[in-house]
Image (cartoon, rainbow, N blue to C red):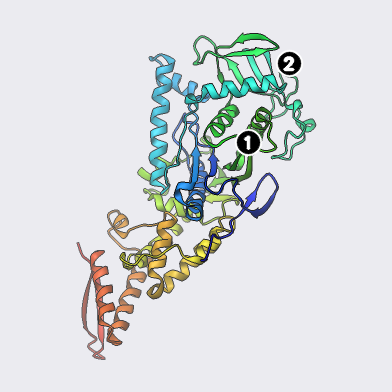
Amino acid sequence: MAGKPTLKLYNTLTREKADFTPIDDQNVRMYVCGPTVYDFAHIGNARPVIVFDVLNRLLRHIYGKDHVTYVRNITDVDDKINARALRDFPGLPLNDAIRRVTEKTETQFIEDSKALGCVDPDVQPRATENIVQMVDIIQKLIDKGHAYVATGSEGKEVLFSTGSMADYGALSKRKLEDQQAGARVAVEAHKHNPADFVLWKESAGNEPGWAAEFTVEGVKQPIFGRPGWHIECSAMSGRYLGDVFDIHGGGLDLIFPHHENEIAQSRCAHGTDVMANVWMHNGFLQVEGRKMSKSEGNFVTIVDLLHSDVFGGRKWPGEVLRLAMLMTHYREPIDFSVKRLEEAERILKRWNIVAEQHDPAIKVELDDEILVALCDDLDMSKVVARLHVLTKESEDFTEGLAASLKFLGLWFPSTAWRKDEPALQDDIKAAIDALVAMRLEMLKAKNFAEADKIRDQLVAQGIQLKDGKDPATGERITTWEVKR
């Protein structure tokens, strides 16, 4: 494909798909909201990790690895973390308990991400490492009349004044006057508006906190406390990507209030028209047709899927989980099920057993048709269709198939599954039979070099061939078995 392909992305902010033009093609910048590390990441958390990994790979392919900066944060300060620390480590000082919780869960999240075939982001900042930046943004908001200090039932708070922003609600398309008390908007007398949200809140003596001082109308007000959730991402994205950057991603559930409030804070603090030019959101996930929740008994963590038998009575390879996510367009909802995983595994095995016949000495780029599909707002349905074509036409496209699977993080060597499955499934048998038949055709055509190549590659994967003659017809036949 000559020149850079045209990348089109759907922008939640504008509700339309448009050509992507980076602010600086020498430094394309993307921020994605990462996990709050109070518990192991569940399968719903895996979807944005995988989706935006594919986008990161695509951006690197188009603009060059050294010209893309991908930031995914770790939220390690949160009231849920405090509660989990008190529950799990009641005998430790709270700060030590919090550290034990967050270090364990963050380490597991990073391991999970790698098992899902994801490339590490360029920066993975922790919220607690960016407190100074948060305090700085909050002071700017106070100075510009977008924030105020008030005393609520739990002490002093610095609140964002939603009424000070003329177009608050542009991302979620919610009008401020319609945001009355409800499930997600607390009614508190100290707020100027029910939708006003916390930037900083005072910590009690048994709660973690940081010393901060805010100047309001020339008067200094020290508030030992901790940040609100939304200000954390404004601070981290601004620190590593600038006041305005190219792409901000996350799950659909984050549009309101989290991303809406990020936009409000960042734009008002920095005086910009936008925070990020493109906002991308992946769709919701259900498990076996129901909303995932612990009360429903269908809450599944990534680590459980990878290493225990809680889902479908077996462990699932990371590549299978990855394809199960990618088979549906990222903006559509997913019903995550055992049947879906089994389908993904069958497809992967078929693709990879053919792709393993490629000659690693032949360097092949990502297939052009797959690149075009990815550039159309990550159209994975077209990608999957093209991979099926490459598999069927493997004699001519084996190298392209292997290169494409590796690019997508779907390289799934047969040795990985043979250890866990002594008996080959029907689709794998069919794939091997197809390769054996292909070899026989090569022999009939006296193309002995290609026939030997297929035989050697099968042997390398533990498949032993045995040539003979059909007693009835005298024609050459080949049988095979798994070599132990």
The answer to whether residue 83 is left or right of residue 107 is: right
Q: Residue furthest bottom?
A: 473
What whole-number distance in Å separates the C-alpha atoms at marks 2 and 1? 25 Å
**Residue at (68, 34) in percent of width and height:** 272
Of badges 2 and 1, nearer the viewer stands 1
Q: Residues within 10 Å of mark 1 (few under 14, many from 20)?
A: many
> Which quadrant of the structure image shows residue 182?
top right
Which image quadrant: the C terminus?
Answer: bottom left
x and y percentages locating residue 442 in the rendered image: 30, 82
Give the number of the disc on residue 189: 2
Foreground of the two, 191 or 309:
191
**Residue at (49, 46) in percent of width and height:** 68
Residue linked to disc 1: 259
x and y percentages locating residue 370 in the rendered image: 50, 63
Position of residue 142 relative to residue 281, above or below, is above
**Residue at (54, 40) in percent of width and height:** 31
The kind of residue tagged 1 is His
The answer to whether residue 212 is left or right of residue 355 is: right
The kind of residue tagged 2 is Ala
Whether residue 309 is visible: no
Foreground of the two, 341 or 144:
144
Label 1 sits on a secondary structure element that is helix
